[in-house]
Amino acid sequence: MNPAALVQLVELAGLESFEHEAMATRFSLYLAPTPEGERRAIAEEAFRLLDKMEDCLSFYREGSDVTRINRAVEGEVVRLDEWTHQCLLIALEVAAASDGAFDPFAGAAAVGAKSQAVPSHLADLPLPEPDEMEPVLAIDAEQPWITKLAGRRWLDLGAVGKGAAIDAMVAVLHEWQVPTAVLVGGGSSVLVYGSPPSGDATTWTLVLPQLPLRPRVSLTAPFALGASGEGFQPGHVIPGAGRTARSQALVLAPTAAWADALSTAALLLPDASIQSLGDGVADMSFLAVSAAGKTLRTGKFTELRFADPVVSLVIPCWCESERLPAFLHALGEALMNETFSIEVLVIDDGSPAPDAAKTARVVADAAARFPMIKPMGTVGQHRGKGGAIYHGWRHSAASVRWLALVDADGAVPAAEVVRGLREALATDSESILIAATRYHRDASRRVHRGWIRQRTGGWFARWAQRQLGLGAVDSQCGFKVVPAPWWRARDAWTEEGYAFDLELLVAARDDGIVVKNLPISWREIDGSNVSWRDGVQLVRHVRALKTKASSPQE
């Protein structure tokens, strides 16, 4: 069974599809109408060539060219099929260009990594030593033969074979004058030529569904793409000394064989080597995701587009460089697999220079891994929590339907943030405000807070709710989601301190916005910037707001 595709093409409507099983995977051809010739007959001819190439290239077939090379004795000359010769030349070129990260002679190691039995046609051969590096063969670049040398490592062209087969089938399609075609091998090897079949479009849209936010990029054909990573060809990536495997790699290259082989090599190459490869070969682009989740992009992959965000989540920061990192990382991880598009804006509230610089580095590191996290914003001069949040909301994307805030300390767990955002997105109403609450009886959502702070906070929340007629049970909890059209339509938001929550909730009361209280888990985190003086100020704000509400309006 094929794994989920690492890449998808949008413009396939209007192309007739054909499928064929080969090389332990499924190949698909998507063909446009031809001036002459029935498309099924053309596809069948291409698939016959594919079967022939599998007979030549398979490590697991007794009569293949690869097996003949592996069984040859030192000094023996082996004549090859033309396609095997070309595939082997490409494999050796990629091995040299990648400094051995792509190794076409890792057949024995791959058998071990896959926990497979040695194929019967190789069972009588001595296994190569793990550290053996003797040259295995000498190849004539012009004529299709090789001379076997002393090295005993086993040739395996599996990591380049699908791409080579796709390149060969393209030649058949060109002979039949197929004007546009998409060729796919197992979801990890793709070649496209010709114009998209519908409309006046001149570019193809490539979607990367397994990356966060499902980014896409526009490409002009012809192009070839290779994808390697978790879920594809288990055991074909074998880290050598000093190499660490990445989780995913995508490569755009001039041919499918090069793209196929380089995507395997890129899983084991450091960033600098990938950059050098991209600079050294025309029409080459890389997207490589490290095991830690950091993404390197070169060439066309620097032009990735993300869906317009529907949620803008602001995290206000005042001297939060110590508490923010763990929460920001957890939040990014929690958002990675969500289907909705979101932007996360960390806004520094004029923190002293050393802390602001440290926070900016924390955010930059997180943004390198999690594309929904944007570079840190700042209000400049210290204004207060409300000022930072309002600044972030004013700079949110125009496409945003929901504006959210969450404290930087991580007291509200990332999973609860995601749950609250889902609650907002599940409603079609633009007249709902979601307010998290720590004061509830949901035993499945534990609140870990000092007894005194929980009691005094609870007293204030109940008192403020009664005095102002608020819909929120916990006015000061640091996670809320508000409808963006409502917030933007209001003339002015002026409260820049901790009382901004009260300003929001009073406005919601006046405008008929329904407050939905969201019971959450919550854990008190050391290092709070809130003092007892801030509590006194909040009491004064409540009284002032009540007086204003009861005063005759002019």
Image (cartoon, grey):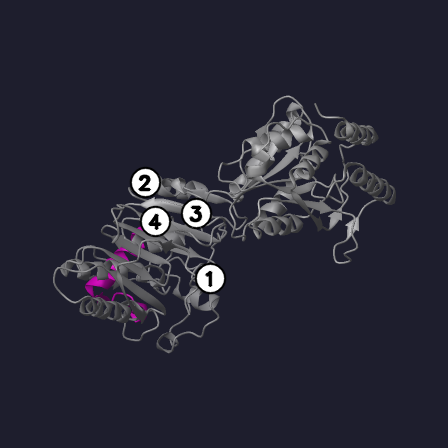
Please name the amino acid that badge 1 sits on.
Gly
Residue placed under numbered mark 3 in the picture? 215
Residue 144, image x, y percentages:
19, 61
Residue 416, image x, y percentages:
66, 50
Query: Mark 4 touching mark 3, by CB under 8 A?
Result: no
State the SS at label 2.
helix
Which disc number belongs to residue 205?
4
Q: In which quadrant is the C terminus drawn?
A: top right
How many marks the image carries: the answer is 4
Residue 361 in view in this figure: no
Please name the amino acid that badge 2 sits on.
Gly
State the SS at label 1.
loop
Q: Earlier in the sequence, mark 4 or mark 2?
A: 4
Residue placed under numbered mark 1 in the picture? 231
Residue 403, image x, y percentages:
59, 40
Few, some or many residues within 10 Å of mark 4 (<14, 14–19, 20+): some
Nearer the camera: disc 1 or disc 3: 3
Separation of marks 4 and 3 at Cα, in angstroms = 10 Å
Residue 127, image x, y percentages:
42, 69
State the SS at label 4.
strand
Query: Which SS does the magenta portion mostly show?
Result: helix
Q: Earlier in the sequence, mark 1 or mark 3?
A: 3
Nearer the camera: disc 1 or disc 4: 4
Q: Earlier in the sequence, mark 4 or mark 3?
A: 4
